[in-house]
Image (tube, rainbow, N blue to C red):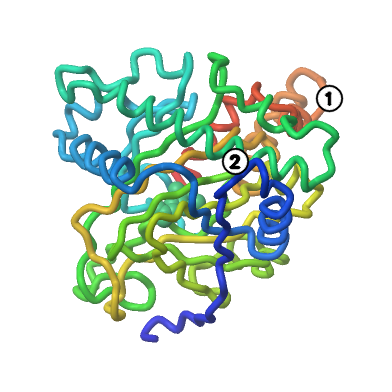
Amino acid sequence: MANGTKYVDREIPQISLADFDTRIDEITSQLCNAAEHVGFFAVVDHDIAPADVAAMFALSERFFRLPDAVKATVPWNPGNVGWERESQVRPSTGAPDRKESYQLQFGENMAGLWLGDEHLPGFRDRCLAFMHRLQRVSERLMICLARGLGFADDDYFVRYHDASKPTCQSVMRLLHYFETPQGLDGDNNDSDKTNQVYHRAGAHADWGFLTLLFEKEGQSGLEICPGREVVTTEPHAALGEDAAAWSKVHFVPGSIVCNIGDLLMSWSDDRFKSTLHRVKAPRGEPGDYYGAAQERPLVTGEEFNARAMSKHFAALQAKLRAKAEEGATETGAGGGSEDTMDSSNSSSNSSSTAAAAQVPAAA
Ligand SMILES: O=C(O)CCC(=O)C(=O)O
Ligand SMILES: [Fe+2]
């Protein structure tokens, strides 16, 4: 491999949700096994028809084809909603992901941020209908995950992700990765050596609860690196794109690829693993997909709290601490900024931390 990335084949468990009520214990055990060992699994027989997924992709594509000036009428904001373009800088790469995204929620954060009907008639209603169907799939997963963790109440997680609450922070993110030049070198530089660096989604772990991801056949790129063995020492350097052995996630027709996020890892006392993953920019390997449109609607559950910020955005933390210390020197007040970020797992008061998901860390 030109770039020196080490690849190994890893099996992504495939889990059927068919006959959910009667098979719930079997499904629970399969899900928990996957969550503990890989952090990724592909769910099939989930009751969302391929035609409905294709229709959602088509709608997403129509959105992204609108002029930027129109998309800019629904700009991203710290409620973790809205449209952004090349603004997400990952600590692992220090460069913006080459993508645009539009994040949608059910509730009050969307005020003024739904694309107007004059641009795409029915957009809001169609998205919401799809989001509700996805929410039902995630609820089934949440039921099993709570059950598998031994919570007395199967609905424990479901209650904290109640889509009927205006504060619900479940997100559907439409994604469009931009076309990249053919022949990137091992450092993701283009062959003209113009110092352009290309990452579709740099290596990261999701800090939400659970991510459900739809892929399109022939649009490869998603790779995982289970175990997080690469983050034991210096997180930023170790999170580097090629620091460890990666595995390609191959398209499985009709499946939803799911992964555990940091919040559920924390909520499960680290029993379930939030796995490092990325969307690799093509490098001329067989099967690489160059563009022009790769869209993946996905839903994250509740966004992680400020603990994720301290983990992923150390630079920002350092700045905040320095500021706090400055304040303390001036006013004589004590206390650090960390405490305010530790409200942790208890649910739906973390919209400001959700914002950090897209704070350009290296800005
Ligand atoms: O598009 C993908 O395949 C994955 C995207 C992703 O990892 C993310 O947005 O968190
Ligand atoms: Fe991710």
Q: Which residue is mark 1?
A: 334
Sequence-first disc among 2 and 1: 2
Q: Residue at x 16, y 39 (%)?
A: 65
In-front residue for pair 335/246: 246
> Disc 2 residue type?
Gly
Residue 145's place in the image compared with 4, above or below, is above
Point out residue 25 in the picture as x, y percentages from the top left corner: 74, 50
Residue 66 horizontal side relative to residue 285, left or right: left
Residue 211 horizontal side relative to residue 222, left or right: right
Per the image, label 2 sits on a secondary structure element best described as loop
Which one is in front in this view, the residue at disc 2 or the one at disc 1? 2
Q: Residue at x 20, y 72 (%)?
A: 182
In-front residue for pair 357/161: 161
Residue 113 horizontal side relative to residue 22, left or right: left
Image quadrant for the N terminus? bottom left
Point out residue 361 in the picture as x, y percentages from the top left corner: 50, 45
Q: Residue at x 45, y 43 (%)?
A: 47
Residue 201 horizontal side relative to residue 31, left or right: left
> Disc 1 residue type?
Gly
- The answer to whether one can see residue 208 in this image is yes
Point out residue 358 in the picture as x, y percentages from the top left corner: 47, 39
Point out residue 307 in the picture as x, y percentages from the top left corner: 70, 40
Q: Within 10 Å of the Cα at label 1, are there few (<14), some (14-19), or many (20+) other Cα atoms?
A: few
Image quadrant for the C terminus? top left
Q: Which residue is mark 2?
A: 208
In-front residue for pair 329/309: 309
